[in-house]
């Protein structure tokens, strides 16, 4: 979409809007300083809860939305922003009073009739309609509300959410979510958390889902279409929601989900969320899977290690989330190492061997070693294999350096101390040093920030 700036007349006078800001004007910032995505998220408030009422017609691709965001102002605000792209905005209210808006790219600037004071809890209501625009990332991958032959595949890492709902789209502003997704009768809409109800009235079915634990906006989903579902509970009562787009997908490897949950609960700590699951869609053109919270989305038939990888993200990525996108290795390196650990713990190839295989597949002069996992060099490299493989290698090398007891204690501590929160690479280094009692700066400099191949542990 071309950048556009629109002014919509509402009961505030144009004069008030266009006048230079009064000395008392307090504008929330349009971003949170993320180096890769400077406009992701907004300053001045904390989102607490979203209600997403979505009505989608796959025949026309038109999405009608009514979104409520409840938030707390963290500073005085005469204006604040949400991230939102495209659509016609049909109504905008703050605390039940019409508000004025300006739009510029992903920034929806909202001027409430009455300024907010620091500490105020307020509610924004946005009603909108339109055909969502698919977001293209700096690495040319696509995300957002992606139409399929029978519905939509909905994934957002790192910046797809504003393509289908107004959000404070930054991983550090987690919130709880209610979803009411209406689709044509017979189709299934899958969102995060637990299913509250599915009601059919006439030609439409509304699927209500609730995500009661904190969730970063990029982890939301509302994938919909023709799915065969299996909604069951595991032995301990955890609801397991599986959905497969037949006949193309079988979801055969979804048997890994309970196995991975069991192992990682033991290794890392109790599963963080009130639901689990997986969605195997027929959207191969998207080309990747995403760890959407509680139910990962798979564009293709998921392989066994991909399922294990996405389940691991419930701990690392979803419950424990980076503050900034540059630290994406904290997601992908942990998920990669978790694949190796799952194989080892089930009697297969030890992680030490998987590590060496990965290490040895890149010669010392390979350009692979020039891109460090904790400083990938830009948003176009977020999903480069350095985040995954060098990230995973870093953890296995750490295991072999600090020893089994300290390493597994570190993983448990890292999870327990940061569950539902946000973390940085510096936090991880500090936690590793505290738990092990070792000075590890040379180790992490080489493995996380080095631009040459680090020596193998013990070499
Ligand atoms: N985080 C996803 C995973 O590891 C991968 C992913 C998300 C991705 N968005 C992407 C990969 C874009 C390539 C391009 O499972
Ligand atoms: Zn991953």
Image (cartoon, grey):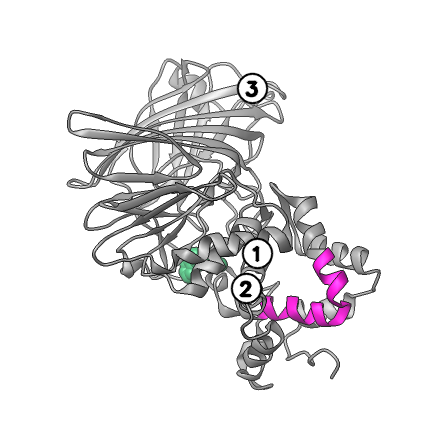
State whether residue 145 appears in this view: no
Q: Earlier along the polypeptide chain: callout 3 or callout 2?
A: 3
Question: Which is in the foreground here, disc 3 or disc 2?
Answer: 2
Question: Is 333 displayed left or right of 127 in the figure?
Answer: right
**Where does label 1 land, which residue?**
263
Q: Quadrant of the C terminus?
A: bottom right
Q: CA distance from mark 1 to mark 3?
A: 41 Å
**Where does label 3 land, which residue?**
121
Question: Which is in the foreground here, disc 1 or disc 3?
Answer: 1
Question: Is 425 displayed left or right of 102 in the figure?
Answer: right
**Where does label 2 land, which residue?**
342
Residue at coordinates 48% horizontally, 67% vertically from top-left?
A: 384
Residue at coordinates 72% horizontally, 78% vertically from top-left?
A: 457
User: Which residues make up the magenta segment?
Assistant: 390-409
How packed mark 1 is, by other alpha carbons closer than 10 Å (few <14, some 14-19, many 20 or more), is some
- Residue sticking out furthest to the front: 235
Q: CA distance from mark 1 to mark 2?
A: 7 Å
């Amino acid at each position: 979409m071309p950048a556009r700036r629109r002014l919509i007349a509402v009961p505030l006078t144009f004069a008030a809007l266009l006048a230079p800001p009064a000395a008392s004007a307090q504008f929330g910032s349009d971003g949170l300083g993320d180096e890769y995505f400077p406009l992701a998220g907004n300053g001045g408030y904390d989102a607490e809860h979203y209600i997403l009422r979505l009505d989608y017609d796959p025949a026309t691709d038109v999405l009608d939305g009514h979104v409520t965001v409840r938030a707390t102002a963290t500073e005085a605000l005469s204006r604040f922003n949400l991230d939102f792209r495209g659509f016609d905005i049909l109504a905008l209210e703050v605390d039940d009073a019409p508000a004025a808006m300006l739009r510029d790219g992903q920034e929806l600037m909202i001027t409430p009739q009455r300024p907010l004071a620091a500490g105020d809890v307020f509610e924004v209501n946005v009603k909108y309609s339109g055909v969502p625009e698919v977001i293209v990332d700096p690495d040319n991958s696509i995300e957002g509300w992606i139409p399929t032959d029978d519905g939509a595949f909905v994934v957002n890492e790192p910046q797809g959410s504003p393509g289908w709902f107004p959000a404070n789209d930054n991983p550090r502003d987690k919130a709880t979510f209610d979803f009411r997704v209406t689709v044509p009768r017979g189709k299934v809409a899958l969102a995060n958390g637990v299913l509250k109800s599915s009601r059919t009235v006439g030609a439409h079915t509304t699927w209500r889902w609730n995500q009661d634990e904190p969730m970063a906006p990029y982890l939301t989903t509302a994938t919909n279409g023709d799915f065969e579902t299996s909604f069951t509970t595991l032995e301990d009562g955890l609801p397991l929601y599986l959905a497969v787009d037949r006949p193309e997908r079988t979801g055969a490897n979804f048997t890994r989900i309970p196995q991975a949950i069991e192992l990682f609960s033991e290794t890392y700590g109790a599963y963080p969320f009130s639901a689990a699951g997986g969605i195997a869609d027929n959207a191969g053109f998207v080309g990747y899977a995403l760890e959407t919270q509680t139910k990962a989305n798979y564009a293709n038939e998921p392989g066994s290690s991909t399922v294990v990888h996405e389940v691991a993200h419930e701990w690392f990525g979803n419950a424990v989330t980076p503050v900034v996108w540059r630290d994406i290795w904290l997601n992908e390196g942990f998920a990669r190492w978790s694949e190796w650990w799952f194989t080892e713990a089930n009697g297969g190839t030890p992680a030490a061997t998987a590590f060496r295989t990965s290490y040895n597949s890149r010669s010392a002069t390979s350009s692979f070693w020039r891109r460090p996992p904790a400083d990938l060099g830009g948003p176009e490299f977020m999903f480069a294999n350095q985040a995954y493989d060098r990230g995973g290698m870093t953890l296995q090398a750490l295991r072999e350096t600090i020893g089994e007891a300290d390493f597994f204690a570190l993983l448990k501590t890292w999870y327990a101390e940061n569950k539902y929160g946000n973390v940085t690479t510096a936090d991880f280094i500090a936690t590793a040093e505290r738990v092990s009692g070792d000075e590890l700066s040379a180790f992490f400099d080489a493995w996380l920030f080095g631009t040459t191949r680090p020596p193998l542990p013990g070499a």
